[in-house]
Amino acid sequence: MSSTTLNKTDAAAGLLFIAIGAVFGVQALGLDLGTSFRMGPGYFPLVLSALLIGLGALIVVSAFRTTSVAMGTLAWRGLL
């Protein structure tokens, strides 16, 4: 049985990507950024964190567009 509601797993993963990207982006701002031709030590981490935030935003948006299948019962015996 599928429904067209929010896919909670994808939304949580996207929000986690955004949070991690934001933390590293704030840390990268404390370093010298430089310019595009003469990059400082904070330039590359800032670009990577922006890409991670963008990827997280795409995942969150796609979580609203996909259909989620209801999860069955959890196999506790197999987990243990």
Image (spheres, grey):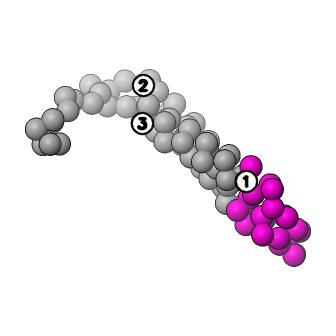
Q: Residue furthest left?
A: 77
Instruction: Determine which residue is flagged by label 1.
Output: 27
Residue span colored magenta = 26-47
Instruction: Determine which residue is flagged by label 2.
Output: 4
- Say what secondary structure mark 2 lies in: loop
Task: Give the foreground label among 2 and 1.
Answer: 1
Amino acid of disc 1: Gln
Q: Position of residue 43 (x, y in %)?
A: 78, 65
Q: Is residue 19 left or right of residue 76?
A: right
Amino acid of disc 2: Thr
Label located before the other in sequence (1 or 3): 3
* Rendered view: 24 above or below 69: below
- Say what secondary structure mark 3 lies in: helix
Name which quarter of the figure residue 42 lies in.
bottom right
Amino acid of disc 3: Thr
Camera-nearest residue between 40 and 5 = 40
Q: Position of residue 79 (x, y in %)?
A: 17, 42
* Rendered view: 36 above or below 13: below
Instruction: Give the residue at x 46% y 27%.
Output: 6
Q: Which mark is residue 9?
A: 3
Dot 3: within a 10 Å radius of its alpha carbon, few (fewer than 14), some, or many (20 or more) residues?
few
Camera-nearest residue between 66 and 50 = 50
